[in-house]
Image (cartoon, helix red, strand yellow):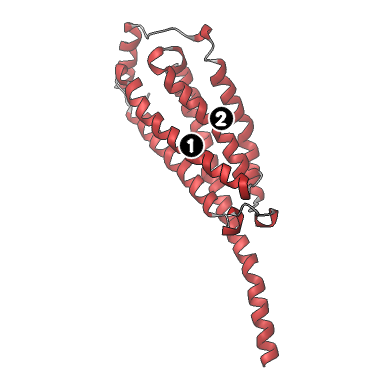
Amino acid sequence: MNGSGGRAKVVGVGLQPTQSRLMSNQVQNLAAVFFLSFGLAASFDGVYLHLWRYRLFAYSETRREHVLHMLRGVLFPLIIYLLLAAPAVGLLLWIAALLAALDLFLQGWDLWEERRARRGFGGLSTFEYSLHVWLAGLHLSGLTLTLAARPLSAWSLAAGQEAAVFAEYAAGVAWFLLPGSIGGVLLHLGLLHPYFYKGERPPEEMNRMLVRGLAPLI
């Protein structure tokens, strides 16, 4: 009985790390779903609304907002590479967490800046405001889940790859998002060229944007 009970106890202890790793992988995959949803929705917001419809890069009052979007675009591929594709442990994990914190700071700055930048043509539409709230929720959920999936041992500066959390689906999502994310950064950077800069938005353009801003879908 003692021998049998002893064996059962040992087996039970042996299963705990496996179960914990399985749960971490599941949380990591869930985080990837949030990041994928964020990436797809952010592509629509960034390319269609910001660059094509509003041309934030072209005018003085919205150019800073464009730069903030570009800076966040630089951080996003670094974060998903380190947290989903690599995945990072030890010092690299701390660097990823600091990049995530910096991204959240820039997100807050962007929210403040767009209120000022869009004031001249009616502010954000209900649709774009709702979209930004949705994006912020997806982004924060992805970050929270992927950081929470890490065991405490992964945060040690001496951690090895045995503490890493690697999920194939999450890594696949990261590699799917990386090319478009990097391309978006390069596009934002290219649009900062003086050729595309128009100065202050002309009054007729402001009036047109104001009318659009009052429309239900911008």
Is 212 left, or right, of 143 in this rendering? left
- Coordinates of residue 38 in the picture (x, y in percent): 50, 38
For residue 185, what is the image quadrant?
Answer: top right
- Residue at image point 36% right, 35% down: 130
Horizontal and vertical percent position of residue 96: 57, 42
Q: Quadrant of the C terminus?
A: top left
- Name of the residue lying farthest toward the bottom: 1
Relative to residue 182, is residue 136 depicted above or below?
below
Seen from the viewer's position, the closer of residues 158 and 111 is 158
Q: Residue beneath label 1, please?
A: 102
Identify residue type, mark 1. Answer: Leu
The tag on residue 127 is none
Tag 2: amino acid: Val
Category of crowding for the residue at label 2, using alpha-carbon neighbours closer than 10 angstroms: few (below 14), some (14–19), many (at least 20): some
As drawn, the label of residue 74 is 2
Q: Earlier in the sequence, mark 1 or mark 2?
A: 2
In the depicted view, which residue is nearer to us: 137 or 131?
137
Task: Give the image quarter of residue 114.
Answer: top left
Percent across and percent down for residue 72 are: 50, 31
Q: Residue at x 70, y 89 (%)?
A: 3
Q: Provide the secondary structure element on which disc 1 rests.
A: helix
The residue at 44%/7% (across/down) is 198
- State left or right for residue 54 relative to residue 88: left
In this view, 90 is above or below 50:
below
Q: Is residue 72 visible?
A: yes
Callout 1 crowding tier (Cα within 10 Å): few <14, some 14–19, many ≥20: some
Secondary structure of the residue carrying numbered label 2? helix
**Mark 1 vs 2: CB contact within 8 A:** no
Q: Position of residue 6 (x, y in %)?
A: 67, 85
- Residue in the picture at 40% in, 18% down: 62
Q: Quadrant of the N terminus?
A: bottom right
